[in-house]
Image (cartoon, grey):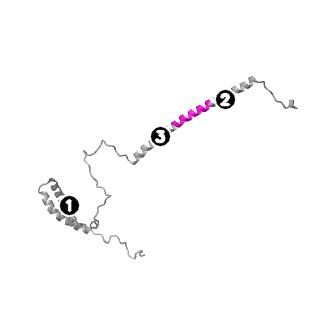
Amino acid sequence: MIPKGGRKGGHKGRARQCMSPEEIDVQLQAEKQKAREEEEQKEGGDGAKKFLDSDDNEDEDDYQQRCKRVEGLINNKNPNRVAQTTKKLTQLDLDGPKELSRRERQEIEKQKAKERYMKMHLADLARVTIIRKQQDDAARKKEEERKAKDNATLSGKPMQSLSLNKQL
């Protein structure tokens, strides 16, 4: 059975080009030389003149190498890429505030929310007990007033009984 494209296999891998070991060696030598010259320039002195002379040649070599690859097509650098910098132990700020991870922040927020809830809950319970006490006092007062009224009516007036037989 023939695949849909009509050919056996796909299109991937046709245009791949590998660098030869000699090209890799030349590239490594150029990088080492450039690193040495940068060190000499930092130290100052005669190395600065050599660096300037060889820098022109290296720029041309770098440009030619970039043109061979995709880097030659791209002139700008990625603004989103953050270069990783290493800090020395003396540069570290151990006394400063430490950034918490997402889980630690969530755990702290959860604990604070629980504390807020318990505080509000206790305040509500206190309010409820005060209201119940007031209601109980009011009910007791009403009951006493009703009993006092009943006692006053019983002691002050004779009881009249109504019967249906007397009216007929």
Q: Kindly identify the amino acid type of the residue bearing the numbered disc 1.
A: Glu
Mark 1 or mark 3, which has the lower sequence index?
1
Q: Magenta residues, as a range?
A: 122-137
**x and y, in percent, of residue 44 in the image:** 14, 54
Q: Which mark is residue 143?
A: 2
> What is the crowding at mark 1: few (fewer than 14 residues within 10 Å), some, or many (at least 20)?
few
The foreground one among 34 and 56 is 56
Relative to 24, is 141 on the left or the right?
Answer: right
According to the image, label 3 marks what residue?
116
Q: Residue at x 59, y 33 (%)?
A: 132
Residue 85 locus on image (x, y percent): 27, 52
Cα distance between the residues tagged 1 and 2: 102 Å
Could you give the CA–CA distance between mark 3 and mark 2, rounded to whole angstroms?
40 Å
Q: Earlier in the sequence, mark 3 or mark 2?
A: 3
**How many numbered marks have been drawn onto this rendered protein structure?**
3
The residue labelled by disc 1 is: 31
Q: Which residue is at a point 70% across and 27% down the rendered structure image? A: 149
For this orientation, the residue located farthest to the left is: 46
Ranked by sequence position, the earlier of labels 1 and 2 is 1
Which sits in the foreground, 124 or 68?
124
